[in-house]
């Protein structure tokens, strides 16, 4: 393996996630981005890795011995001399909490919109999360091979609903049956749509002066008009504004027809930022951890349990924030627990490999027996605590009801363990022995119920709870105590022992906010 200075390595990382409303085409785009990256590489570049089969068989043995099966939660590929880590987010909308947490490990995002639908509710929520962290967003308007809204309408929609300035980088020539390609506004070149061209339907760009010959008169006329309008009325692309999360560059294409996918790969290589400085607390003082810092550090943004119920192993996904990580390294959590990372996993498209080294921006999977939980920070000295893997206010609360009350201890363990994995949240009301579980989506509850039964053998039902929502209470200890005293039956502790207000309605939350101006009722809790 060649040795490159760490500073050069981390600077080549581009770690990103794709956000979208279900059905906009995220899965199709993911597949085709990987396909395009792979086919470009096969077409000319030398594969820089994978020559060592030992690493693969090592991994398979671990998988067998420990009974873990890990899906690719991150897919790594190379393009234009950069290493891209595409973080996978669960497709189903009910797993949005997982998606939100994954975004904390991303340095940028691609927002996929369905060209016939524009901005949809789930997109709106995800963009809110990106905004919490100022994650820059690049927009891909998908399904141009179907009848689409007018491009200017789509841009207005983004601007109005998401409060993002839009800088169209391309302009489409019609859509659906008449779709002819896109104009690259920066290069003044036209990329024709060639649906029958085989693997990638983006044809070779031609100078703008030649596009008339490739399009019907009416499509050409519309395109010229559109381009004039875009140049006159739309703001020019500004890299700083994009990096600060105020502006989104907009691209058009069809993931399914593999049109515009290579252009998207190139765009990402051109504009997406690499690893950024992360806010943290180091020995009680606020600090910033830079990706080039010497000490290896990172944080757990996702934990995946074993698929085999006979084993209790889990894989923690760690986003590295600094340093040059080496296999076999000893790392400590912010709580002082230490572990030797002998089998870190990295993910290359369809493959997994044991990583010998990794850098800021990379994601490694660490198999462990439950030592690591979502939100944990890791570093060599154990002195770094990263700010912020959020928990989100659950929209569904359920009370766990045991068939056999003597199993309460087992249930506690099972629910705590699932909460540590981030499957659901767990709240213990200060009065009574109830276990209240919270989730952002119904499917999370179903997955949890199934796992409690299958993995822990506990007969439990989850019934409606007398609460509608939960808020973390923040304020001075004295104020919190006063509030808790007045609302004893509605106060619970979360898994970290932090106070939570279980409210009967959204109205009750607003009312409490008015009555207790010194307290904050938070919709999202950053764990640290
Ligand atoms: P998601 O992950 O965002 O939920 O979306 P996914 O990629 O699964 O795509 C949702 C549907 O949209 C799929 O069709 C997919 O084939 C289609 N689709 C994605 N990109 C394009 C595109 O560029 N053009 C057109 N015309 N369709 C596109 P489906 O019928 O639901 O599934 P399938 O049976 O085709 O797999």
Image: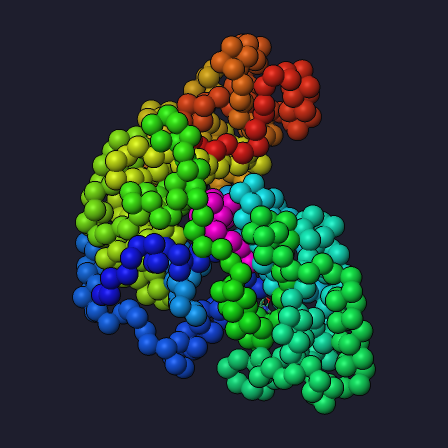
Q: Quadrant of ligand 1?
A: bottom right
Left or right of residue 422: residue 1: left
Q: Residue at x 43, y 41 (%)?
A: 278
Q: Residue at x 39, y 52 (%)?
A: 361
Q: Residue at x 58, y 79 (%)?
A: 202
283, 139: nearer the viewer:
283
What segment carries the magenta color? 99-110
Q: Residue at x 41, y 82 (%)?
A: 43
Measuring from the top left, give residue 347's x and y in whole percent.
34, 60
* Quadrant in the rendering for residue 384: top left
174, 496: nearer the viewer:
174
Whether residue 329 is in magenta: the answer is no
Vertical order, 70 against 296 (above or below): below
190, 153: nearer the viewer:
190
* Quadrant in the rendering for residue 281: top left
Left or right of residue 198: residue 363: left
333, 65: nearer the viewer:
333
């Amino acid at each position: 393996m060649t040795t490159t200075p760490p500073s050069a390595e981390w600077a080549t990382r581009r770690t990103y996630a794709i956000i979208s409303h279900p059905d906009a085409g995220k899965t199709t785009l993911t597949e085709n981005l990987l396909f395009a990256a792979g086919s470009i590489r096969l077409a000319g570049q030398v594969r820089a890795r994978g020559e060592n089969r030992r690493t693969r068989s090592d991994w398979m043995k671990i998988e067998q011995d420990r009974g873990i099966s890990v899906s690719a939660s991150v897919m790594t590929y190379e393009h234009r001399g950069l290493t891209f880590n595409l973080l996978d987010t669960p497709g189903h909308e009910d797993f949005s909490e997982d998606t939100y947490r994954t975004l904390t490990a991303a340095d940028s995002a691609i927002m996929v919109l369905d060209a016939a639908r524009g901005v949809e509710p789930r997109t709106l929520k995800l963009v809110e999360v990106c905004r919490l962290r100022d994650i820059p967003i690049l927009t891909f308007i998908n399904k141009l091979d179907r009848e689409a809204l007018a491009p200017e309408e789509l841009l207005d929609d983004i601007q109005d609903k998401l409060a993002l300035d839009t800088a169209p980088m391309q302009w489409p020539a019609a859509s659906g049956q008449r779709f002819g390609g896109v104009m690259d506004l920066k290069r003044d070149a036209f990329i024709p749509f060639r649906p029958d061209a085989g693997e990638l339907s983006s044809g070779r760009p031609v100078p703008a002066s030649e596009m008339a010959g490739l399009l019907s008169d009416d499509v050409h006329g519309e395109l010229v008009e559109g381009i004039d309008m875009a140049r006159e009325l739309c703001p020019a692309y500004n890299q700083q504004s994009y990096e600060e999360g105020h502006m989104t560059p907009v691209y058009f294409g069809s993931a399914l027809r593999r049109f515009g996918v290579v252009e998207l790969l190139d765009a990402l290589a051109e504009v997406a930022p690499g690893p950024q400085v992360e806010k943290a607390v180091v020995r009680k003082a606020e600090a910033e951890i830079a990706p080039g810092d010497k000490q290896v550090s990172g944080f757990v943004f996702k934990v995946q349990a074993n698929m085999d119920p006979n084993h209790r192993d889990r894989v923690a996904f760690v986003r590295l924030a600094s340093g040059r990580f080496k296999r076999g390294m000893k790392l400590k959590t912010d709580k002082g627990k230490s572990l030797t990372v002998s089998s870190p996993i990295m993910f290359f498209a369809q493959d997994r490999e044991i990583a010998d080294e990794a850098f800021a921006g990379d994601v490694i999977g660490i198999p462990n027996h439950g030592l690591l939980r979502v939100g944990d920070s890791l570093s060599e000295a154990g002195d770094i605590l990263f700010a912020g893997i959020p928990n989100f206010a659950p929209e569904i609360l359920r009370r766990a009801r045991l068939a056999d009350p003597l199993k309460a201890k087992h249930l506690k363990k099972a629910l705590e363990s699932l909460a540590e994995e981030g499957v659901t949240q767990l709240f213990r009301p200060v009065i009574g022995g109830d276990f209240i579980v919270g989730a952002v989506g119904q499917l999370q509850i179903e997955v949890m119920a199934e796992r409690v039964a299958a993995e822990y053998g506990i007969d439990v039902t989850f019934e409606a709870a007398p609460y509608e929502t939960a808020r973390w209470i923040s304020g001075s200890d004295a104020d919190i105590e006063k509030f808790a005293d007045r609302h004893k039956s509605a106060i619970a502790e979360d898994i970290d022992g932090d106070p939570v207000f279980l409210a009967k309605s959204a109205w009750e939350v607003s009312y409490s906010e008015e009555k207790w101006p010194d307290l904050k009722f938070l919709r999202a809790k950053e764990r640290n």
